[in-house]
Image (spheres, rainbow, N blue to C red):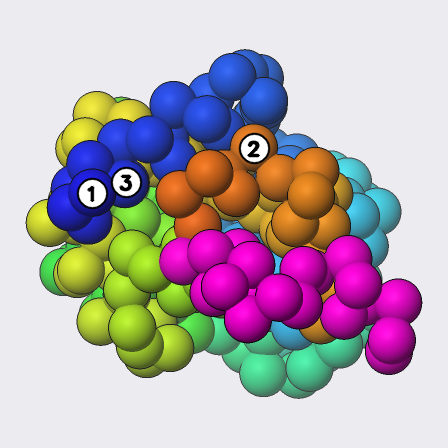
Amino acid sequence: MTKKQKALAAVEALENKYPDAMCTLDYTDPLQLLIATRLSAQCTDARVNLVTPALFEKYRSVEDFAAADVADVEKLIHSCGFYRAKAKDIVNMCREMIARFDSKVPDNIEDLTTLPGVGRKTANLIVGDIYGKPAVVADTHLIRISNLLGLVATEDPKKVELELRKILPPERSNNFCHRMVFHGRDTCVARRPKCAECCMNGFCSYFTKMQKSEKPCEKSEKRR
């Protein structure tokens, strides 16, 4: 099985298991998703969703955030962690969008990654979920599971993104990434994968290796 064939098999397996998977951050417009994604760095989506209602009630536009007192934003997002850096980035990214992008959230990775606090993972999420373009959101789940499957052999986020872009169906890549998050939380859990229950164990390099070594995943899990 080639990597491209394996990637397609993974896409189809996850589509069957998680047909309705989508981004778990709550938002109503591009700006809200951009800000929520910045807040989600080293923080759970569930926690971000508890914080953003009050934040978005007080600041409703790019102009509102650009004019905000950073200290006030810090108070509203305090429980998300790293709140000082995040608050500064949020205010500054909005100022940059006013100055350079006509107050709009850019629709491409190149422009998005010039904004304060916006990396390729965030940019891909915006490009995919908001603008419907092919995207690969290289979060920890995608990186880990792609390595286990044998789709990639690197933990560098950018390299993972670029390698997966070569083998994933472009029009299905964005939702594939969301489904990988669900699978990573539900089945392919870090350090204790439930390989026997996995919908991809028929073509997973890690599972095949465990079988050949006569150390099935569940047995090794019990020994831990």
* Picture disc at residue 192: none
Mark 3 and mark 1: Cα distance apart in space? 10 Å
Asked whether 163 or 204 is in front, the reply is 204
Q: Residues within 10 Å of mark 1 (few under 14, many from 20)?
A: few
Q: Image point 57% across, 46% down: which residue?
A: 181
Q: Is residue 119 magenta?
A: no
Q: Position of residue 20 (x, y in %)?
A: 57, 17
Asked whether 88 or 141 is in front, the reply is 141
Q: Amino acid at mark 2?
A: Cys
Q: Residues within 10 Å of mark 2 (few under 14, many from 20)?
A: some
Quadrant housing residue 154: bottom left
Chain-order first, disc 3 or disc 1: 1
Residue behind mark 3: 7
Mark 2 and mark 3: Cα distance apart in space? 13 Å
Quadrant of the rendering where the N terminus is positioned: top left
Span of residues in magenta? 205-224
Q: Position of residue 52 (x, y in %)?
A: 73, 47
Q: Is residue 51 left or right of residue 5?
A: right
Q: Position of residue 114 (x, y in %)?
A: 22, 70
Asked whether 70 or 202 is in front, the reply is 202
Residue 58 in view here: no
Q: Secondary structure at mark 1?
A: loop
Residue 34 in view here: yes
Q: Position of residue 132 (x, y in %)?
A: 27, 26
Residue behind mark 2: 199
* Picture disc at residue 1: 1
Quadrant of the rendering where the C terminus is positioned: bottom right
Mark 1 and mark 2 in contact (Cβ < 8 Å)?
no
Q: Image point 47% across, 56% down: which residue?
A: 208
Q: Amino acid at mark 3?
A: Ala
Q: Amino acid at mark 1?
A: Met
